[in-house]
């Protein structure tokens, strides 16, 4: 009689075979799991390549050189920043968002900071870009010198984040929160901490610092911090009925409103910045509306009161620039202009309202001195480099008795 406790040779072979298969599966499954996890982790990142697949030179050549000739003549051809996150943005190392639209910009010390909000929930077409929930707004942090992308910060808001401004006195980044009618603040210490951790994105939502500045009825969409004051404006179309819809108001560092109705600014203003040069103060306003209409940079010479508050202006000219310009910032001779036209939402016509013309996926950098010089004299090189050398005795007429055009002609005769 067969001993039932002793397995047959067939059963032993089967058991060995099953064991061998399990060992093989285990040896293959774990490495494959690690590879799959690595691939998934690698897929969650913030894009840094040009979505237009063009070099900076090719981009400049593709723009309407006739319409934008004056603006293009002021461009620093060796300076530009590919806007990160247009193709995809890493949200807290958890998910990808392909609907970010760049808005605000400011230079803060060694960093160039760009804000963006999510519009993927507005996508009409049923495509890979459609999302059911709106993601939080973000900040892209770049090295202002090397022009390299450093990290993405997720903000504690889903608002438009239409403008940024840097307060170097208190080391704060101001962020326009038009949804709530306030200006939020974020300390540079927090931003530097995120950069130093070296991650592509951070799992924490960065909370704002202190109490927001109540803009008292305004929906802030453009900001500038200049000489101790915060200037706040809102986006306004010409057909708005509010009489003061296109006026910019001023706050001190404590958040106190200094004027109820400040100076007027162009309709459809998207960004504003101030700068000093040659003992004068200038303001440049970026304004745009629509995907097919050229944007413009309007330049003003400003007057100040005894406290240093800018209170009046004289327009000296404007340049047409590529469509859909947003926030701007001036640092030294650099005018940084942000564009939203290359975002997937507009470039790919995801809302079925048309594609954007003259799309730009860069932070364009133009020369402040060339801009001012070209508008004042038509020849920026002579004005910029020699206007300070004008001998006093060459001015034969009293300046207050000479109109602007005659002053320009007098300047040109001296060279």
Image (tube, rainbow, N blue to C red):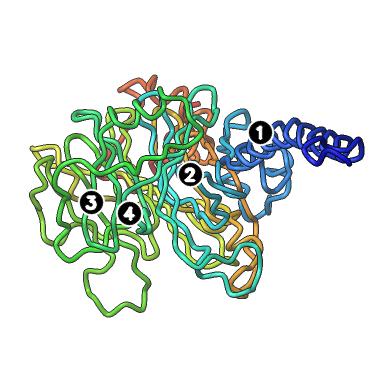
Q: CA distance from mark 2 to mark 3?
A: 21 Å
Check residue 34 in the rendering and tell me which mark sits there, or answer none: 1
* Residues tagged 4 and 1 counted as in contact (Cβ below 8 A): no
Q: Nearer the viewer, mark 3 or mark 4?
A: 4
Q: CA distance from mark 4 to mark 1?
A: 35 Å
Q: Is residue 166 above or below residue 145?
A: below
Image position of 134 (left or right of 29): left
Residue for badge 2:
337
Check residue 183 in the rendering and tell me which mark sits there, or answer none: 3
* Residues tagged 3 and 1 counted as in contact (Cβ below 8 A): no
Q: Residue furthest right?
A: 10
Name the image quarter holding the N terminus: top right
Q: Nearer the viewer, mark 4 or mark 1?
A: 1
Neighbor class of circle 2 (other Cα within 10 Å; few <14, some 14-19, many 20+) is many
- Residue sitting at x 47%, y 61%: 288
Image position of 173 (left or right of 142): left
Q: CA distance from mark 1 to mark 2?
A: 43 Å
Q: Is residue 230 above or below residue 151?
A: below
Q: Earlier in the sequence, mark 4 or mark 1?
A: 1
Q: Earlier in the sequence, mark 1 or mark 2?
A: 1
Q: Secondary structure at mark 3?
A: strand
Q: Secondary structure at mark 4?
A: loop
* Residues tagged 2 and 3 counted as in contact (Cβ below 8 A): no
Residue 163 seen in the current view? yes
Q: Nearer the viewer, mark 2 or mark 3?
A: 3
Image spot of residue 338 (x, y percent): 49, 46
Q: CA distance from mark 3 to mark 4?
A: 12 Å
Instruction: Name which quarter of the figure residue 322 lies in.
Output: bottom right
Residue for badge 4:
157
Which residue is more in the foreground, 243 or 252? 252
Q: Earlier in the sequence, mark 3 or mark 1?
A: 1
């Amino acid at each position: 009689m067969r001993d039932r406790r002793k397995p047959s040779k067939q059963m032993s072979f089967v058991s060995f075979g099953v064991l061998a298969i399990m060992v093989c599966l285990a040896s293959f499954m774990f490495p494959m799991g690690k590879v799959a996890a690595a691939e998934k982790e690698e897929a969650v990142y913030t894009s840094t390549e040009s979505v237009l697949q063009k070099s900076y030179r090719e981009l400049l050549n593709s723009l309407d050189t006739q319409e934008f000739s004056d603006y293009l003549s002021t461009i620093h051809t060796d300076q530009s920043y590919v806007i990160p996150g247009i193709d995809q943005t890493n949200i807290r190392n958890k998910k990808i968002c392909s609907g970010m639209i760049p808005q605000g910009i400011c230079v803060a010390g060694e960093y160039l900071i760009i804000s963006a909000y999510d519009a993927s929930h507005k996508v009409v077409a049923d495509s890979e870009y459609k999302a059911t929930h709106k993601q939080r707004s973000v900040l892209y942090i770049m090295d202002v010198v090397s022009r390299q992308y450093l990290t993405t910060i997720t903000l504690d808001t889903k608002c438009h984040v239409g403008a940024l401004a840097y307060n170097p006195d208190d080391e704060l980044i101001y962020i326009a929160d038009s949804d709530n009618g306030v200006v939020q603040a974020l300390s540079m210490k927090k931003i530097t901490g995120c950069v130093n951790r070296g991650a592509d994105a951070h799992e924490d939502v960065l909370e704002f610092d202190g109490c927001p500045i109540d803009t008292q009825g305004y929906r802030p969409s453009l900001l500038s911090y200049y000489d101790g004051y915060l200037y706040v404006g809102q986006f306004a179309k010409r057909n708005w009925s509010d009489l003061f819809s296109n006026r910019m108001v001023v706050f001190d560092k404590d958040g106190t409103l200094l004027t109820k109705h400040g100076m007027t600014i162009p309709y459809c203003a998207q960004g504003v910045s101030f700068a000093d040069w040659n003992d004068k103060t200038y303001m440049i306003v970026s304004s745009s509306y629509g995907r097919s209409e050229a944007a413009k940079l309007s330049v003003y010479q400003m007057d100040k009161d005894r406290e240093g508050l800018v209170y009046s202006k004289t327009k000296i000219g404007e340049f047409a620039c590529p469509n859909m310009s947003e926030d701007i910032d001036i640092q030294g001779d650099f005018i940084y202009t942000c564009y939203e036209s290359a975002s997937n939402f507009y470039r790919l016509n995801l809302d079925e309202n048309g594609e954007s013309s003259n799309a730009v996926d860069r932070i364009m950098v133009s020369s402040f001195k060339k801009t001012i010089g070209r508008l004042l004299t038509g020849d920026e090189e002579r004005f910029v480099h020699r206007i300070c050398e004008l001998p006093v005795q060459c001015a034969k007429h009293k300046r207050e008795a000479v109109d602007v055009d005659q002053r320009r002609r007098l300047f040109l005769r001296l060279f």
